[in-house]
Amino acid sequence: MIRDPLFSFVVPAYNVERYISKKLGSLLSQTDKDFEIIVVDDGSTDNTYNVAKEILEKSGFSNYTILRKPNGGVTSARNMGIKHAKGKYIIFLDGDDYVSPELVEKVKEVVSKSDVDMVCWKFQLVSEDGNSIKRFIPFWGLKEGQIYSGLQVLEKILIERSFRVWTSSAAYSKRLIIKNNLFYNENHYVGEDQEFTYKYLINSHRICFIDNILSYYTQRKGSITKQPDTKQFDAFLAIIEAQRYISNRLAGDGKSEASKLILAFDEYAVISFLTALKVMIKNQKWPSYKDVLERISARYSMNLMEEALSRARRSEKIIKLGFFRRIGYEIFKFSPKLFVYFTWVITQIKKE
């Protein structure tokens, strides 16, 4: 009997014919082959499916599946991949990102020594031409060789800001995902990865860290996170969803750490809201505050501005913020209208 692979790589792919060969090449060159590849073509209108099919058919690697579905977004593609995965652990990789050839080998070393819920590692931002992008990413919060609870890791991420987890820089237990129904929220265009990770962490008890760069995140021009679209505010809602979920999970837990974490979500949600607001107004001519509100309310039924302001005013400065971000935060608490104009002026100065 052929045993199931230890790892399942779930690769959502939409119109990435130019990039997917590098991604699949990085998987096919793994030093340890104890994995399967699941490519989910999310209704691509280019040649993504055929490119992936040809590469895998000619590779000599037989443990792969290529699925096709109508376009529904990266979340629905990941969820389909989860349902088809046979591995004990799932690793999500978007179509234009790639991994170190030693990833499977190094993660396998960890999970073979201890039954863990999650393994995470360092990642590197790279440009489309493969050059490293120098940007500060905190990783000092976790130490290699130690076991952490999900609550501890959430505190490192949200309160101390001493650690970062990216969707493709972790191996997730399929058993834990299925047991707790932790599928991606298909209603959110942005922020769905954070929501998934936070919900997953609060259900995790044994987490390990590998102190090596094993994943590479390709930052493309025109990526989702750079589009000036009101859908950016989905990230704000995703954080609120995660907060509610975690609050329910911690209900009755009198630990001060738990209470502090829930309060930190308020501040983190507002930061996400302000980031989306900056993206929306930075390319406008002199912004009308009324127009800003109308554009937001055109997509969302709730009054997001009032919700964000309410959360900002009850926050307790739990999260460690840089000086200028804290200034912007305090301006928003005083007057959202002033924040809009202040932000626009700053972005115009930076353009010059």
Image (cartoon, grey):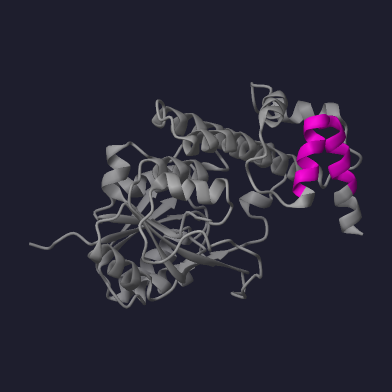
60 horizontally vs 146: left or right:
left
Query: Can residue 267 be seen from the camera position used here?
Result: yes
44 horizontally vs 328: left or right:
left
87 horizontally vs 20: left or right:
left
Residue 57 picture location, percent across and down? 31, 70
Closer to us: 48 or 5: 5
Quadrant where the C terminus sits is bottom right
Residue 168 picture location, percent across and down? 46, 58
Residue 267 picture location, percent across and down? 64, 37
Residue 133 picture location, percent across and down? 65, 70
Q: Residue furthest left?
A: 1
Q: Is residue 206 above or below residue 97?
A: above
Where is residue 337, by image quadrant?
Answer: top right
Q: How many marks?
A: 0
Q: What's drawn in magenta, residue-wise?
A: 325-345
Q: Is residue 275 above or below residue 133?
A: above
Residue appearing at x 40%, y 30% in the figure: 253
91 horizontally vs 109: left or right:
right
Closer to us: 30 or 239: 239
Q: Is residue 292 above or below residue 321?
A: above
Q: Is residue 320 magenta?
A: no
Quadrant where the N terminus sits is bottom left
Query: Can residue 63 be seen from the camera position used here?
Result: no
Residue appearing at x 50%, y 55% in the figure: 165
Residue appearing at x 58%, y 38% in the figure: 264
Q: Is residue 332 magenta?
A: yes
Magenta span: predominant SS is helix
Q: Is residue 304 above or below residue 100?
A: above
